[in-house]
Amino acid sequence: MARMKNPEKRMGLGGHLKELRNRLFWSALFIFSGTVIGWLIFDQVFELLQAPIVRYAAEHHSNTTINFGSVTGAFDLRMQTSIFLGVLLASPFWLYNLWAFITPGLKKHERRYTITFLGFSVPLFAAGCWLAWNSLPYFISSLIGFTPTGAANVINANEYVLFTIRVLLVFGLAFVLPVVLVLLNFIGVLSANSILKSWRIAVFIIAIVAALATPVSDPMSMLLVMIPMGLLYFLAAGIAWLHDKRASKRAKALGLDFDEFDNLADESDS
């Protein structure tokens, strides 16, 4: 009887709010569990993060060290880093819960595109973080190199860890942005022509992101980030152009224009 009253199995506002509450609860639970793990592995993570400092001090016989400037500094850093690691370690679980919450409202082709987006964005994010991690010793060496001769460089531990995390995240997210452009093109929000016409703005934004991601004044460091980001941007534009060209051919075969073809595809998936 209930199925006859609701043949499309649509969920009411109360059902959506209950579903959201459950998804948020499980996501928070996984993040809390990841935070506990992050607390336990903090010493190993901190040892990895401070390795470039230790290596620089040994190679240059420099009085460079990481320092905790307050009584609560070590605890605050451990807590902040643990929460960050918790969000990172639990990302497969809270991303799944986010996906499970929004997927009923997506059309069939939109679900397929978002799955593909996740499949490409994860390795690209990892590639950006890998590039940042390999560039980090060079950044640190360049920055510490400004220390005057005879002076000690006592680095605040909280600022240093947040600095390394920022560099890793900016690099990772910068490599994911082209995939976002492809996703917006495939769901009909952004055309390939719009992407290509905005290349000057894109290059300007890439330069700003590169400047934020590379805290040193060396232009070669910016180019190290700008070149792969620029290539990924134009690769995204090329993929979008091929998609639009294929969709345009299908639309002409059906005697429709491009927008009518997209609307027809949406109706066939619903």
Image (spheres, grey):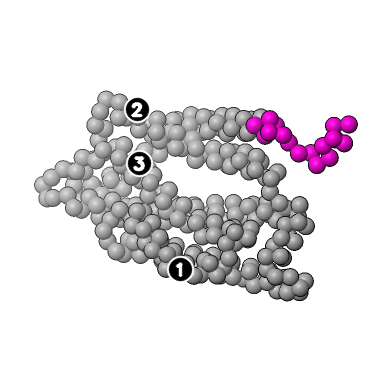
Query: Disc 1 residue type?
Result: Trp
In magenta stretch: residue 8? yes
Q: Which residues are the magenta region?
A: 1-17
**Split into 4 quadrants, where in the image is the N terminus?**
top right
Tell me the residue that label 2 is attached to.
Answer: 75
Can residue 87 be seen at all in this image of the molecule? Answer: yes
Q: Residues within 10 Å of mark 1 (few under 14, many from 20)?
A: some
Residue drawn 61% across the image and 41% down it: 98
Residue drawn 42% across the image and 64% down it: 201
Task: Kindly report the distance in space between the C-alpha atoms of the residues bearing marks 1 and 3.
Answer: 32 Å
Q: Residue 93 location, x and y as percent?
A: 59, 38
Query: Disc 3 residue type?
Result: Leu
Residue drawn 85% across the image and 32% down it: 2
In magenta stretch: residue 48? no
- Position of residue 162 relative to residue 143, above or below, is above
- Position of residue 174 relative to residue 240, above or below, is above
Residues 136 and 199: in front is 199
Pointers 2 and 3 in contact (C-beta within 8 Å):
no
Query: Disc 2 residue type?
Result: Phe
Q: Please identify, in this view, whether the residue under mark 1 or under mark 3 is nearer the observer.
A: 1
**Sequence-first tag of 2 and 3:** 2
**Sequence-first tag of 1 and 3:** 3
**Sequence-first tag of 1 and 2:** 2
Where residue 162 is drawn, which disc sits there? Answer: 3
- The quarter of the displayed image where residue 207 is located: bottom left
Residue drawn 68% across the image and 51% down it: 111
Tell me the residue that label 1 is attached to.
Answer: 199
